[in-house]
Every structure is written in C-alpha cells, then in structure tokens.
C-alpha cells in the first residue's frame, strides 16, 4: 500500500451502512472521511498518514473545499483506508485477495473454485461476490442481471461526469465477463458475449472521451468482432457509428463517412429501425461537415430528421442504446453539424434550444454543447456572448472528467488569441487558469 502506516479493515457495520455505500458510489470523499472518523475512530492526521496526503489537504476535503478526481489518488485512498475497490468503482485491490496457500509435503488439492472466480480480483463487480458465492461459482440469470445493471450505471455516470475515469472499472468488468464466458454454454454464453460486446464498446467510448484514440479504436474493433460473432447487425451498426465519430475527431473525415454509411447498411440488413437510422444519418452529417461538403451534410441532416419523424410513437421498439437520441439530441446535433460547416447563424439558435431542453444532470453533454455555442458566437464576432458561453462550458468541465471536452475548451482559448486584450477574454482566461491550470 501507499500510505506510511497500515491499519486493519474498516468495521463491517460501516461498510454495510447505506450512508457509506452512497458516499462511495458518489466518490464523495468528504463524507467518506467524516464517516471514517466518526465510525472507525480514524482521525484526519491518521487518514493523511495512511493515504499519503498532508493533514491540511485531508481537512480541506472533509470540509468540501477540495475533491478527489485523479484515479491514482483514489486508488491510494482505497488502499490506505482498506476500502474494497468495488465500492469505489475500482478493480479489486491486491490486498483483497488472500495469498495462495503453498504446501510441499502433499499433493495439491483440487481447486475449490473455477479459475474465472480466482481471477475476479482484477474486476469491479461489487455485489456480484455474493451472487457468485450463492451460485457456487456458476453464471446465473441473476449474475447477468447484475452485470447489465452495472453497465447501465456506467453509462449514466459517463453522461453525468465523463467517461475517462471509468476506464479501469470498465476494462476490469470486460475481462471478468470474458473469464465467465469461458465456462458458460448455450444461451448464457450467448448473453455473456453480447454483454462483452457492450462493455468493449463502453471501454472504447471511455478511451475516446479520454482522447486516447488508438486504444479506443482497439476496443471498438473488439466490440465489432463480438457483435459480428453474435450476428447482431444492429449492434454492429452502433459500434460502427462510434468508430465514425472517432474518425471525425481523429482527422479522418473520409473514413468517418465510409464507416457511417457501412453502419447504415448493417442497420438496414437487420430490419431497418428508424431511430437507429436517424442517429446514423446524423453521424454521417458530422463527417460530411468535417469535409466541408455542405450539400451532402444537409442531405444527411434531412434524412436524419425524416427517420426521426418515422420513429415517433415507436421509441419503445428501439434498442435501449439508441434511446438517448431524442428530439433534443436531434436539434442540438443538427446545430453542431451546421457549426462544423461554418454556418454559425443557423447553428446558434438550435444549440441554444438544445441547451435549454437538456437536463442539468447531463453535465458532459451540456459542457460540450456550451462549447459549440461559444464557437458559433465567436464566428459571428459576438465576443461577450462567446466568452459567457465558454465560461458555462468551463464551469461544467470543472465538474467532469472528460479530456475531450477540456480539449475543446483549450481549442476555443487558442481561437481567442486575436482578442487577447479584450476584457471578456481576459476574464475568461483568468477563469480558465483557475479551473484547468
């Protein structure tokens, strides 16, 4: 462990308490430290020593003046206080795994549990410990339900806080599901492979949000292979759409167009689903916009709108992974495509309307869209409004872990260079340094 001292496990009644579990789930270290002090008798100076921090930093965290976001520091706290990794969305910590018993005077006994359970310390699955124990180490429908629930929670957290910090947990979960699949058969094996495809896509998305495009491409490719093996053409279309967006960001818009069109072909072969097609046409529009091909971009936007109208009243029939693409998303994405084309005056009101409609909890999306609003306003020489919108993006960026969004903020700052002496820019730059350093 990283701290300068060690201690025994936290009291079981503390670990089992709803208040503790809620605090860990939210990674609210202010509450975690206060509960450790109150329920375990570990005072701030001792917390500091165990976690490799200064007492003053611990005090600031306890009073809510500072937070913890970096994964290495969170892991250090987990190790120092002996917080089970799964409670914080981490892989199981090394100290959670009993050392193997080695004997030399008798033949080794048969393993009491299958290899996939022995390797589970690499993965964050929380309550699955109990499920697997009850099932005698075998995969059950309850196991699958718990795994699916975790994936849904990951997507919710990605939407609210960004995906970069989820990478260790998601990859660990993927490895665990792969281990389970090795000993499964029949429909359970098929369901586990589908779940692995979803986790691989989620891992790819988390690395994409962290701007690690090569690693993201690797996981998207894995998701594509897994869904192809399942014959799930709709999910293949989903993965290809992610790869198209990645290509757009990675400076390969021609590849992005090809991937978006291939995704549409896959979706058509799977019984064309209008909401899926609407989303895919919008991904194509993004790629055409990056190529500055205005006619093709507008045609793709029109097809996206037409397919969305066809989907009205049939949303429940759409796959769960595409239901995020609602009318608000259609409006704001249309605005972003037009902004990429340089048609700022048409883009601005659409993005404004999207931000007005979006839920406050969608922090990463709102930060991203606020950046695009600032971009359109700057294109129209509305410097005060652009800096105000960029300030909103900046404030939201401070609450999420998304290098992709932070990169947009830095890009916007570079575009402000010709206006460096203007008062709104000076104020924005000062705020940017405070938030991002």
Image (tube, rainbow, N blue to C red):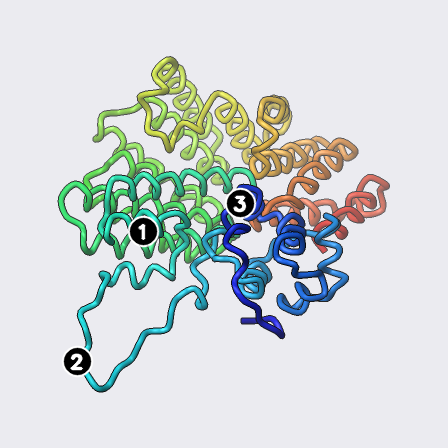
Determine the image quadrant of residue 278.
top left
Above-or-below relation of 407 to 81: above
Determine the image quadrant of residue 115.
bottom left
Mark 1 lies on residue: 221
Q: Residue furthest left?
A: 186
Q: Residue furthest top?
A: 313
Q: Secondary structure at mark 3?
A: loop
- Residue nearest the observer in this picture, 186 or 411: 186
Q: Residue at x 38, y 57 (%)?
A: 123
C-alpha gap between disc 2 and disc 3 = 43 Å
- Residue nearest the observer in this picture, 228 or 141: 141
Left or right: 396 with respect to 192? right
Q: Quadrant of the C terminus?
A: bottom right
Q: Secondary structure at mark 2?
A: loop
Mark 2 lies on residue: 107
Left or right: 135 with respect to 387? left
Lower position in the chain sequence, tag 2 or tag 1: 2
Determine the image quadrant of residue 400.
top right
Q: Residue at x 52, y 58 (%)?
A: 83
Task: State which mark lies toward you, 2 or 1.
Answer: 2
- Residue nearest the observer in this picture, 177 or 247: 177
Q: Report if the CB atoms under discs 3 and 1 are less than 8 Å apart.
A: no
Q: Kindly tell me whether residue 225 is visible in this rendering.
A: yes
C-alpha gap between disc 2 and disc 1 = 44 Å
Above-or-below relation of 340 to 167: above
Residue 17: which numbered mark, if any? 3
Within 10 Å of disc 1 (Cα), the crowding (few <14, some 14-19, many 20+) is some
Q: Kindly tell me whether residue 259 is visible in this rendering.
A: no
Q: Residue at x 52, y 32 (%)?
A: 337
């Amino acid at each position: 462990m990283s701290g300068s001292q060690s201690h025994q496990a936290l009291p079981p009644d503390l670990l089992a308490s709803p208040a503790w579990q809620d605090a860990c789930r939210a990674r609210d270290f202010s509450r975690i430290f206060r509960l450790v002090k109150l329920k375990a008798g570990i005072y701030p100076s001792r917390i500091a020593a165990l976690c490799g921090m200064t007492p003053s930093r611990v005090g600031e965290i306890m009073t809510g003046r500072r937070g913890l976001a970096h994964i290495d520091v969170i892991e250090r706290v987990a190790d120092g206080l002996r917080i089970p990794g799964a409670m914080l969305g981490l892989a199981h910590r090394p100290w959670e795994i009993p050392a193997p018993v080695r004997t030399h005077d008798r033949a080794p006994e048969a393993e009491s549990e299958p290899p996939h359970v022995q390797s589970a310390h690499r993965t964050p699955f929380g309550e699955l410990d109990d499920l697997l124990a009850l099932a005698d180490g075998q995969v059950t429908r309850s196991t699958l339900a718990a795994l699916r629930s975790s994936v849904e929670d990951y997507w919710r957290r990605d939407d609210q806080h960004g995906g970069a910090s989820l990478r260790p947990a998601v990859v660990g979960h993927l490895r665990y599901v792969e281990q389970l699949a090795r000993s499964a058969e029949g429909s359970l094996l098929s369901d586990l492979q589908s779940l692995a495809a979803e986790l691989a896509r989620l891992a790819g998305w988390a690395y994409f949000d962290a701007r690690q495009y090569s690693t993201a491409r690797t996981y998207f490719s894995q998701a594509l292979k897994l869904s192809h093996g399942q014959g799930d053409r709709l999910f293949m279309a989903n993965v290809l759409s992610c790869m198209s967006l990645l290509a757009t960001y990675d400076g390969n818009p021609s590849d992005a167009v090809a991937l978006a069109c291939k995704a549409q072909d896959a979706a058509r072969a799977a019984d064309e689903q209008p909401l899926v097609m609407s989303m895919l046409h919008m991904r194509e529009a993004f790629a055409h916009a990056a190529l500055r091909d205005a006619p093709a971009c507008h045609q793709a936007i029109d097809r996206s709108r037409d397919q969305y109208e066809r989907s009205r009243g049939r949303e429940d029939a759409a796959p769960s992974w595409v239901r995020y693409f609602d009318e608000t998303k259609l409006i704001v994405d249309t605005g972003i495509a037009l902004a990429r084309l340089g048609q700022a005056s048409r883009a601005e009101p659409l993005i404004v309307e999207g931000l007005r409609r979006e839920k406050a909890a969608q922090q990463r999306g709102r930060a991203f869209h606020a950046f695009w609003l600032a971009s359109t306003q700057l294109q129209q020489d509305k410097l005060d409004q652009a800096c105000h919108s960029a300030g909103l993006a900046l404030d939201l960026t401070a609450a999420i872990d998304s290098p992709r969004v932070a990169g947009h903020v830095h890009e916007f700052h570079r575009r402000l260079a010709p206006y460096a002496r203007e008062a709104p820019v000076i104020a924005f730059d000062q705020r940017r340094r405070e938030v991002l350093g």
